[in-house]
Amino acid sequence: MAKATDKAIYFDSSLCTDCKGCQVACKCWNNLPSPIGVNENQNKATAENPYIGSYQNPPDLNSMTRLIMRCNEVETPDLQKGVGLVFSRRSCKHCTDAGCVRVCPPGALYHDEETGFVAVDQSKCIGCHYCATACPYDVPRFYGEKRFIEKCTGCVDRVQNGLKPACVTTCQPGALDFGQRSEMVKKALGRVEVLKARGYKDACAYGINEMDGLHVISVYKYGLDVHQEVKEPKLSAIVPLSEVAKPLSAVGIAAVVAALGISFINGRKYDIGDFRYDEVTGVQTKHGEFYEQFDPAEIKAGEEQEPVHEISRRFNGDKRKGGK
Ligand code: SF4
Ligand code: SF4
Ligand code: SF4
């Protein structure tokens, strides 16, 4: 079960206005791009029915989007006008029994000690996609050429510095909150009682016991079906299998790292085009012959600067917050 000291994000669907401020705040803090595009539902438009649109944009989590607010158009007996808009938060739920953590071979996904959130060390991700198959909520996506994991980190980088998660700080109607998990559970149960008293008979709290306790506690005004929530989340069958294979994968990774290390230590000589350069002696040879003594002082000012500058610019441009 979740630890007594754990923290949690609280989401109350009955207060949410679907302004999507939290979606935007997540993008801003985590430096995630937002390419301009058309509403994907327009692809389904026909000559007879050209106006197929939706408030749902983007349609689901993607490689640049860690959080979406779902906007479902539904017909419920509780709603008087026939069609109503029902809002839900879709992002990582930070499971205590997290399939993604259990299967991740290099340990790129891990539980943050202070909060219980499932944080990410993107530098360790090898892009194997095991976590995507292990997650009962279909959360992990993959970003960039390296295809490293992209998912909500619970903003542990902010929390460690005394701040609330970025999405929480932006919510105007108070649908989001953050604090001790036990307090958030208490708040959710209290809110459900209020909603039930107002006639919302299916109102419920979610995340208290699921997956040994989630670290996102939700209040669903119209019940799990209408909010399209996973009713009985379970660990994927691949989790136990992967756990057997995990030590082998780890040995494999360790072997590759060790081999690279040995190759680096021994890599005092390497070939550049027609030349061979010895890092110990500084000697360059061409086709096996002594060519010339390497003298760093001979490098003209600016000659080496540009490539280094270019590499570091690209690296920093690719580096985003939210993980280690
Ligand atoms: S910021 Fe608050 S009100 Fe706006 S969409 Fe997010 S949870 Fe809903
Ligand atoms: S919701 Fe999925 S990605 Fe998030 S902690 Fe649970 S298993 Fe991992
Ligand atoms: S906790 Fe941070 S990373 Fe997660 S959805 Fe909110 S802003 Fe995004």
Image (cartoon, rainbow, N blue to C red):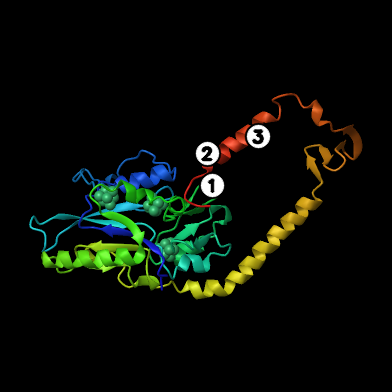
What element does badge 2 sit on? helix
Q: Does residue 38 appear left or right of residue 128 in this picture?
A: left
Q: Nearer the viewer, mark 2 or mark 1?
A: 2
- Ligand 3 under 8 Å from disc 1 Cβ: no
Local crowd at mark 3 within 10 Å, few (<14), some, or many (≥20)? few
For image coordinates 35% across by 59% down, the residue present is: 179
Q: Does residue 41 appear left or right of residue 150 in this picture?
A: left
Q: Nearer the viewer, mark 3 or mark 1?
A: 3
**Mark 3 lies on residue:** 308
For image coordinates 10% across by 57% down, the residue present is: 82
For image coordinates 44% across by 46% down, the residue present is: 30
Return the disc, 3 or 2, that comes first in the chain's sequence.
3
Q: Residue 265 location, x and y as percent?
A: 79, 52
- Ligand 3 under 8 Å from disc 3 Cβ: no
**Mark 1 lies on residue:** 145
Residue 117 higher or lower than 210, as above or below: above
What element does badge 1 sit on? loop
Single out the residue that lies furthest toward the left.
80
**Mark 2 lies on residue:** 317
Given the image, on which type of amino acid does mark 1 rest?
Answer: Glu
Return the disc, 2 or 1, that comes first in the chain's sequence.
1
What element does badge 3 sit on? helix
Q: Are marks 3 and 2 in contact (CB under 8 Å)?
A: no
Q: Residue 295 location, x and y as percent?
A: 84, 31
